[in-house]
Amino acid sequence: MWQFISLLVLGASAASATLVIRQSQAYACKCYAGESCFPNTSAWQALNTTVQGNLQVALPPAAPCFNSVAGIQTYDANRCQQVRSSFSNQQWTTDHPIANMWTYWTNETCSLYSFNPSATCTRGYYGDYVIMAKTREHIQAGVDFARDRNLRLVIRNTGHDFMGRSTGYGSLIINTHSFKSVSFTTQYAGPGSYRGGAVTVGAGIQVRELYRLANARSPPVVVVGGECPTVGLAGGYIQGGGHGPMSSFYGMGTSSSCSGSLLGDILVDADIFTSITGADNALSFEVVTASGEFVTANEVENPDLFWALKGGGPSTFGVVVSVTVKTFPEVRTSGVSLDISSTNSAVFWQGVAALHDLSNRWVENGMFVYYELSNGRLHVQPMVGPNMTASQINAVVQPMFDRLRSQNVPFTTQTREFPTFFDLYIGMFEDEGAGVSALTGGRIFSRQDISSNAARIIQAYQTVTNNGAFIVGHIVGPGTGAPVVDNAIHPVWRNAASFSITSYAVAGNAALSEKARAQNIITNVVGRALRDASPNGGAYVNEGDLEEPNWQQAYWGSNYPRLYELKQKWDPNGVFYARTTPGTENWEVIDYGTRLCKRL
Ligand SMILES: Cc1cc2nc3c(=O)[nH]c(=O)nc-3n(C[C@H](O)[C@H](O)[C@H](O)COP(=O)(O)OP(=O)(O)OC[C@H]3O[C@@H](n4cnc5c(N)ncnc54)[C@H](O)[C@@H]3O)c2cc1C
Ligand SMILES: *[C@@H]1O[C@H](CO)[C@@H](O)[C@H](O)[C@H]1NC(C)=O
Ligand SMILES: *[C@@H]1O[C@H](CO)[C@@H](O)[C@H](O)[C@H]1NC(C)=O
Ligand SMILES: *[C@@H]1O[C@H](CO)[C@@H](O)[C@H](O)[C@H]1NC(C)=O
Ligand SMILES: *[C@@H]1O[C@H](CO)[C@@H](O)[C@H](O)[C@H]1NC(C)=O
């Protein structure tokens, strides 16, 4: 049944792979510890010298709570206590060399909540070695080593990936979190015609620290980043597309929409943005490619790679070292919070419908809405109205309140006005936790879906909560009235009005049958209900389901064929891998989530 043959896989650089046969399917697999093709200690030491001592043996976050892990003495009572108290803190997990914020895809074989130091802790699906890269040469050395030795390579920035793509069994990890450079300009010098403000950020920069620096400029500026304070800007976020609180107003992380916004049915003049209409928010990338080269990708240099990096998938085309994005003028911003909780199901869902049925109205006014929805609880914190005073946002939301009152839905609400978006961001968005184990899925609803299927979407939401899942909702319309922007994101984003993440709690160390049951709920019960309710919708690769049916179409629509070709051009041998990204059709993680192999 088990058969290992070392063979030579011919590629750009010949690397030995392991041939494995499972149920008469042959695979060429990456090299893993214990196999003859795996680097010996002196090879790892040589790599450590090349990366100036920044190579570490990767140990799971709870390692200090156990006597030994992977043959290394690890117990340290104080550090163990610190891990236990910090693991639900997003910044703490981000700063750890390899920790994953959502533990499901780590297999949870080293439990924080095991109080017996002599119990077993193994790495599970965490990697074996990590390069804490400080320079681009360190990244290049890591890519070269992984490619030449045929190792599974994982790029890890903040560990936010809901879908476990910043971890991998037996892998060499490149950690890009140390790249914290930030450089603003008020006049981008090109290439391209854009001459407005821009900022170049290192791969490790996180959203809230960038917002803070942007707001400290004179005059203050904004960047389109995520809602979450600790997500990285240049890593998975921008390479997957990137939506955020300013996206209905200024576009996706990877594009600009620059449209006029309807303020209470009055078209607000947005002529000042015509100079950037049709351009992209991402102006340039610096990247280490699969061949280990350090290249620039923008409108002029490597324009195909530039296109692909703008939404074509995380960890697919290269390791991003830095990205330059547009900055925009700060604007007075107002926000509305809304809470509805009711044990009367009919009343409660009328309340949800009063918010969600008006999604098109919110995005056509340049707004963004963040909410959490579970059975009997809707928490909207907040509805964001860029460039609106309190009375302006109140006028826009009035129809929703009229509807809530006419249907006797009990609610609490508050409107607040802030001098800038940043002040609202700090004042109204809430911090989020970490360290939870769950499976996710998600769905983008287009404006057509909202206008023709709103009631059916609410029914689908009921299917979600009735099956024990919950929704993290974003009402966001990055293409509201926007010009067509040429980048790799699913074109459905141009028509989007709402995007929902579904989440279903299940332990990473649950029995396989329990994992299968949870996956079935996410994909075939709640996922199906949302898909059926949104024939013009799509899905988002950063916040989706690894088992999404027909993922190529769901995540990229008509952009997929070009992305597939570009993957063949830039990474023909699969140096980079993340599940459900372009060109991974023949790759599979076999043997219960461990070996990454290519079907032969
Ligand atoms: C609490 C929370 C809130 C979120 N809010 C938003 C939001 O408002 N808007 C939104 O669009 N998304 C949001 N996301 C999703 C987020 O965009 C993705 O999780 C994204 O993949 C995170 O990227 P990262 O680099 O920070 O994380 P990681 O987990 O470190 O990396 C994610 C993926 O990107 C790859 N990657 C990381 N760094 C690089 C690099 N330098 N070069 C190439 N590939 C790289 C990794 O290999 C992995 O595949 C949120 C996620 C969380 C957990
Ligand atoms: C370790 O591997 C290298 C090749 O990577 C080889 O040249 C060397 O002889 C090996 N050393 C030992 C001690 O096996
Ligand atoms: C790499 O070198 C540094 C500095 O000498 C050392 O602290 C570290 O343990 C080494 N890493 C490995 C994997 O041996
Ligand atoms: C993953 O977890 C399962 C049990 O939940 C275990 O049987 C399996 O050995 C684990 N695999 C790894 C690589 O940790
Ligand atoms: C904000 O709205 C005013 C009109 O109220 C308009 O003149 C201005 O251009 C808008 N600013 C932006 C950035 O859209």
Image (cartoon, rainbow, N blue to C red):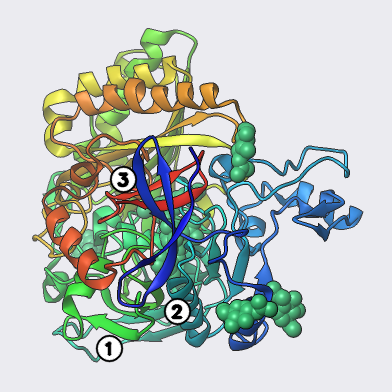
The nearer-to-camera label among 2 and 1 is 2
**Residue at (13%, 55%) from the top-left corner?**
561
Judging depth in this view, the residue of 209 and 315 nearest the camera is: 315
Kindly identify the amino acid type of the residue bearing the numbered disc 2. Asp
Question: Can the viewer see residue 322?
Answer: yes
* Residue 421 in picture, x, y percent from top left: 40, 61
Where in the image, quadrant-wise, is ligand 2 located? bottom right
In the rendering, which numbered label is found on residue 144? 2
Kindly identify the amino acid type of the residue bearing the numbered disc 1. Gln
**Residue at (25%, 70%) from the top-left corner?**
281
Left or right of 387: which side holds 557? Answer: left
| Mark 1 element type | loop
Is disc 3's CB within 8 Å of ligand 5? no
The nearer-to-camera label among 1 and 3 is 1
Left or right of 45: which side holds 519? Answer: left
Q: Residues within 10 Å of mark 1 (few under 14, many from 20)?
A: some
Question: Can the viewer see residue 227?
Answer: no
* Residue 211 in picture, x, y percent from top left: 46, 68
Sequence-wise, the earlier of marks 2 and 1 is: 2
* Residue 134 in picture, x, y percent from top left: 57, 82
Distance between the Cα atoms at labels 2 and 1? 36 Å
Kindly identify the amino acid type of the residue bearing the numbered disc 3. Ile
